[in-house]
């Protein structure tokens, strides 16, 4: 397997949740800039229509990520005006629960384990930029659980993992500098803009440091298309199909894996 499990600070249980939320805010701003809500929204729309569903259950939602933007995009598409989103996590995020307590996008208080989908609410399961946080045995458990419980699932990562690991290591100084510098701009675009977001970007630059490191570290952790083949070995069934590929539109991109009961 090409994937390498490089340390991401936000995975550490001791990493403060407010700082994790601030770093995620920057990821959402970046995702909007490069058209992720549109490219992912088109993929989700196609899958919902194929399965005749309007409910989305996002797994590993963290502090929300880009899925509320995707829902807004979907509700603007013919036939999906009634689409609803339930965000879930193994460790539900208290701030996100408060922010999304009502309306078509809401956050579930109870823990949902992506490796046990029989227990998850009904609807299309999505995992957005969260699959690379799982080690191979957990990642495979998610896929196997989708097949066993015949749940439709769409996994999306906003980048592919094509760079050789040695080149990733060599390019780290430049990668970290560019990503860190971008973080100053991203923080200014966060809405609503909190004191923490500004203070820990411009006065004590913890957000640019962790955004830069975790952003770079996530690249070798992504399961590329060949790694996905390896994870899927033995999970091909007559009553369940898998499709994977590159997602692309004018600005957005990424890779996806869709599993559907037939
Ligand atoms: C990077 S974070 C959130 C990514 C989020 N989707 C986004 O776009 O910002 C990954 C999340 O996966 C959650 N997670 C880890 N293992 C999980 C599991 N087995 N089931 C559900 N969520 C899990 C973590 O608690 C964490 O909040």
Image (cartoon, helix red, strand yellow):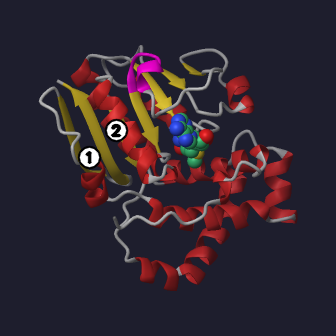
* In front of the other: 159 or 234: 234
Q: Where residue 219 sits: x, y (%)?
A: 47, 64
Residue 165 shows in the view = yes
Answer with the quarter of the image where residue 112 lies: top right
Residue at the image point whose x is 31% and y is 20% from the top: 78
**Quarter-of-image position of residue 191:** top right
Disc 2 is placed on an element classified as helix
Bounds of the magenta segment: 117-124
Whether 33 is among the magenta residues is no
Q: Give me the residue at 46% from left, 17% from top.
A: 121
Residue 3 bears which disc, if any? none
- Which quadrant of the picture is home to ligand 1? top right
Q: At which x and y percent is residue 142?
A: 40, 37
Vertical order, 80 against 152 (above or below): above
Residue holding disc 1 = 232
Q: Is residue 72 visible?
A: no
Q: Residue 9, position in %: x, y?
A: 67, 59
Q: Residue at left 36%, top 54%?
A: 253
The first of marks 2 and 1 along the sequence is 2
Q: Mark 2 points at which residue?
A: 143
Answer yes or no: do the residues labelled 2 and 1 have beta carbons within 8 Å?
A: yes
Between 150 and 225, the one lying in front of the other is 150
| 195 left or right, relative to 155 | right
């Amino acid at each position: 397997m090409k994937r390498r499990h490089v340390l991401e600070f936000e995975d550490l249980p001791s990493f403060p949740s407010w700082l994790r939320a601030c770093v995620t805010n920057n990821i959402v701003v970046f995702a909007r800039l490069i058209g992720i809500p549109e490219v992912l929204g088109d993929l989700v729309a196609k899958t919902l229509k194929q399965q005749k569903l309007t409910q989305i259950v996002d797994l590993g939602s963290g502090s929300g990520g880009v899925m509320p933007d995707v829902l807004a995009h979907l509700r603007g598409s013919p036939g999906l005006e009634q689409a609803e989103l339930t965000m879930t996590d193994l460790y539900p995020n208290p701030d996100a629960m408060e922010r999304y307590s009502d309306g078509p996008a809401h956050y579930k208080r109870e823990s949902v384990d992506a490796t046990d989908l029989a227990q998850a609410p009904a609807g299309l399961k999505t995992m957005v930029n969260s699959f690379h946080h799982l080690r191979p045995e957990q990642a495979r458990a998610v896929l196997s659980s989708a097949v066993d419980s015949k749940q439709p699932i769409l996994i999306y990562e906003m980048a592919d993992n094509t760079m050789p690991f040695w080149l990733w290591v060599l390019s780290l100084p430049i990668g970290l500098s560019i990503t860190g510098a971008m973080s100053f701009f991203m923080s200014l675009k966060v809405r609503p803009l909190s004191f923490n977001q500004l203070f820990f970007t411009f006065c004590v630059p913890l957000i640019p440091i962790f955004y830069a490191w975790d952003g770079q570290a996530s690249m070798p952790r992504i399961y590329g298309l060949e790694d996905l083949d390896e994870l899927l070995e033995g999970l091909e069934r007559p009553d369940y199909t898998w499709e994977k590929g590159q997602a692309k539109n004018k600005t957005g991109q990424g890779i996806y894996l869709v599993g559907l009961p037939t």
